[in-house]
Amino acid sequence: MPPGLRRILFVDDEPKVLEGLQRMLYPLRNEWRMEFVSSGQQALECLARSDFEVLITDVRMPVMDGIELLTEVAERHPQVIRLVLSGTVDQELTLRSAVLAHQYMVKPCDAKTLRARVEHALNFRVVLDDPGLKQLIARLRSLPSMPAMYVKLIEALQSPDASVREIGAIIEQDIGMTAKVLQLVNSSLLGISRRIAKPGEAVVYLGVDTVRALALSASVFTQFRSAGLPGFSIESLQEHSLKVGAVARHIAKTLNWPRIATDDCFVGGLLHDTGKLVLAHNCPDLYRKALTLAQQNQVAIREAEREVFGTTHAEVGGYLLWLWGFPDLITEVAAMHHNLPDRPSDAIGPVAAVHIADAVVNRRVEQDLDQGHTGVLALMEHVPEWQAFSEDLQVQH
């Protein structure tokens, strides 16, 4: 196999679909090494004997359906990127596959769209060196929520009087819930032609019944269970993230940025520390070590994380959001909120806004702001006003 050739496995029980895919993707034969199989069992056999980077599967198949295949692949080969290409309209199957898969596409899918999705899945800028962390992150189907917020959501969903607005307001206050509903609503799952950037708006499109199914049937929303981590609490992380989102949104409004950029600032701010949640919940012993190291050596937590994990929460969060199909801009906000990309000020927008908001909310403007970056340098005159806004800010609980 020529070096650099991407390894893609396609699974569909319909021979005509496989033949169509082969014809459509033939021009990519010098870039992708593709195999086409007609059953889940054949797919598992292929994965067992060869290293594939991406699996693209239908959902509705006989004997072993796509749900069973995705479940097996997630367990046995967690490093494989799992994409669904399906035409099913069965809501239960669709939801279950959307939870198990990293991204969801709807048939028919043209070669340009399919290629773009696969290349996006393979070319993320932030690379994690630790294969164990890559596997851990690829296994994740959801992020845990604050216990109080989880209980509040379940109570609202079980009430016959709960409104879409009420449920949306609950979800917008939680990192894990926001990440999942935005992932699902912006997949091809619903066929929405424009990107949804607001969690509340996402609930309107998904509908109460779908959110209820996600919470109660698919078990997508789960509670964070404290592992006794000194110096870490999900409540503090949540409050910090909401404040950063609110300040970043205020920055965008101050600068008269377009609405979509303003919305991205809030969502990016809310999700910028997603990696801390991933590490604290899934690697509590190692994260406890990092927290202790940061306290003993009086260094930033990201420096201690790099010593313990070989990477930081920023890269971990960016990697997860990329896997879940979030736009490049949001993944960059998470991955680069401490170290801004080397691009002109007008090209980084929300990344710079969240970087500044994070420093302002932490009251570490002098220490944390990258004042050598042209994007930050151009905005320094506004920082005192944004600091005042942050000081007066009260987040909703």
Image (tube, rainbow, N blue to C red):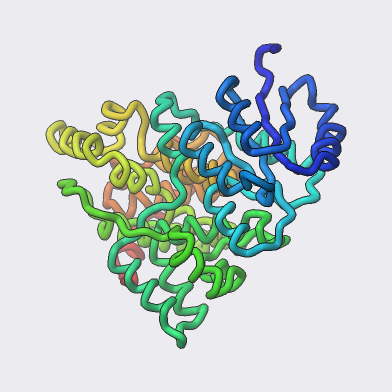
Above or below: residue 351 compared with residue 173: above
In percent of width and height, residue 112 lies at 79, 40
Task: Identify the residue shown where x is 36% and y is 45%.
Answer: 278
Residue found at the very far front of the displayed protein? 63
Where residue 165 sits in the image (x, y, percent)? 50, 79
In the shown orientation, is residue 247 left or right of residue 13?
Answer: left
106 is higher (above) or lower (below) than 375: below
Instruction: Indicate whether 342 appears above or below 355.
Output: above
Q: Nearer the viewer, residue 284 or 202?
A: 284
Q: Residue at x 79, y 27 (%)?
A: 28
Left or right placement of residue 49 versus residue 158 in this view:
right
Residue 377 shows up from this direction: no
Residue at screen point 43% across, 43% down = 317
User: 251 or 41, which lies in front?
Assistant: 41
Q: Give the position of the C terminus as an image quadrant.
A: bottom left
* Residue 33 occupies quadrant: top right
Q: Quadrant of the N terminus?
A: top right
Residue lying furthest top in this view? 2
Percent from the top left, x then y, of residue 140? 44, 45
- Between residues 154 and 336, which one lies in front from this camera angle? 154
Q: How many marks?
A: 0
- Residue at the (39%, 48%) spot, across then down: 274
Most foreground residue, 265 or 176? 176
Could you say where residue 49 lies in the image, as x and y percent from the top left?
58, 20
Residue 227 can be seen in this image: yes
Left or right placement of residue 96 versus residue 117 in this view: left
- Among the 4 quarters of the image, the one containing residue 299: top left
Residue sitting at the far bottom: 161
